[in-house]
Amino acid sequence: MSTASLAQQIIEWIFAQRHNPGDDQVTFTRDDLISAAAALGASRPKNLGDIVYSLRYRVPLPDSIRQTAPPGREWAIFPGGNAVYTLRTVPFNLIEPRKGLRTIRLPDATPGVISKYSLTDEQALLARVRYNRLLDVFTGLACYPLQSHLRTSITIANAIDGTPSSSQVETDDVYVGLDEHGAHYILPVQAKGGSDSLSVIQIWQDLRVAEQKFTDLIARPVAAQFMEQSVIALFEFQESNNQITIAREHHYSLVPPEELESHELAAYRTAAQNAIR
C-alpha cells in the first residue's frame, strides 16, 4: 500500500472515531496514527511525519471528510502541540494560482550556471526568485535574503489541555525588507514545485514565526509556485480575525532580455504611469 493511500485511510478512520456532526475541529495525536494503522491491518508506518505531510500537501483528504465541512469551508491539518494535530475548517486549504491572470514578462537575470545545476524544482524556484529580485518587484520593498530553510519552533496552546507547547516548523526562505519610510519587514517565503501543493497551514506557521521571532518587524508572508511553462506565481497573505486571505497574486515569466518587445515595455510603462496617477 502506498504512503498516500495509507494516509487517507488512516485519517478517515481517525475522523470517523473522533468527529461528531457539527464539529469544526478534530484533534488527534501521533499515537492515533499508529492505532489507526493497526485497526486497518497495516504495518506501523515507518515515518509518521510522512503520513501528515502527504495529507497536507500531496493528496486530498477523503471525500467522507471533505463532505462534512460547512459550505465555503475546507478541512486542514494544523499543528496542535508536540505530537498533536488538529483538523480545522478554514475558508481554503490548498493555494492554487488563478486562471486567466495576466502574466508579466521580465528579463531573466538568473546566472546560467545556477540554472544548469539547480537540483530540484523548489531550489530552482527559490533561485529564480532571488536572482531576479522578484520579491522587490512584487512587494515594492528593497528585500534582502536573511536565511534559507529556517528551522525553528513556535509556541502554541496544546489542543488537548491548553498548555504552552512547542511545534517544529520550517520556512523555505526568509527575507528582510525596507520601504521608502525606513520601516522594516520580515518576509517568510514558502515555495513549492513539482506535484506538491502550497497550503494555508504553511502561511499560518510563517505568521507565528514572524510574530514570535521577529516581533518588531512587519510581517508580509509570501508564497511562490511554478506554473506551466515555468511561469512563477507569487502570493501575498494577510491575517484578520484568525482568518488568512490572499491579499495579492501576480504571475511572472522570466524570458531572455532580447525577447521583450517594445510594445510590451510601452504597455508596462503606461500601466505604471496610470498607477501613479
Image (spheres, grey):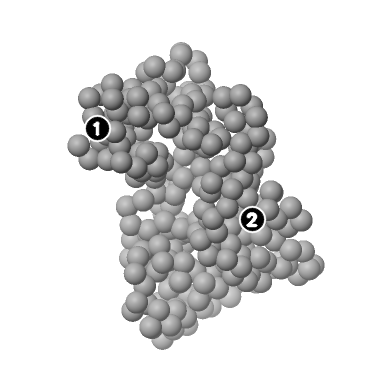
In x, y percent, where is residue 84? 50, 32
Which corner quadrant of the image does residue 67 belong to? Answer: top left
Closer to viewer: mark 1 or mark 2: 1
Q: Residue at x 63, y 50 (%)?
A: 209
Q: Measured along the vertical axis of the image, is residue 12 above or below residue 134?
A: above
Quadrant containing the C terminus is bottom right
Q: Are marks 1 and 2 in contact (CB under 8 Å)?
A: no
| Res 251 visible | yes
In x, y percent, where is residue 27? 49, 25
Name of the residue lying farthest toward the left = 1
Q: Secondary structure at mark 2?
A: loop
Amino acid type, residue under disc 2 in the picture: Arg
Label of residue 220 in the image: 2
Q: Categorize mark 1 by other alpha carbons within 10 Å: few (<14), some (14-19), many (20+).
A: few
Label of residue 43 in the image: 1
Name of the residue lying farthest toward the right = 181
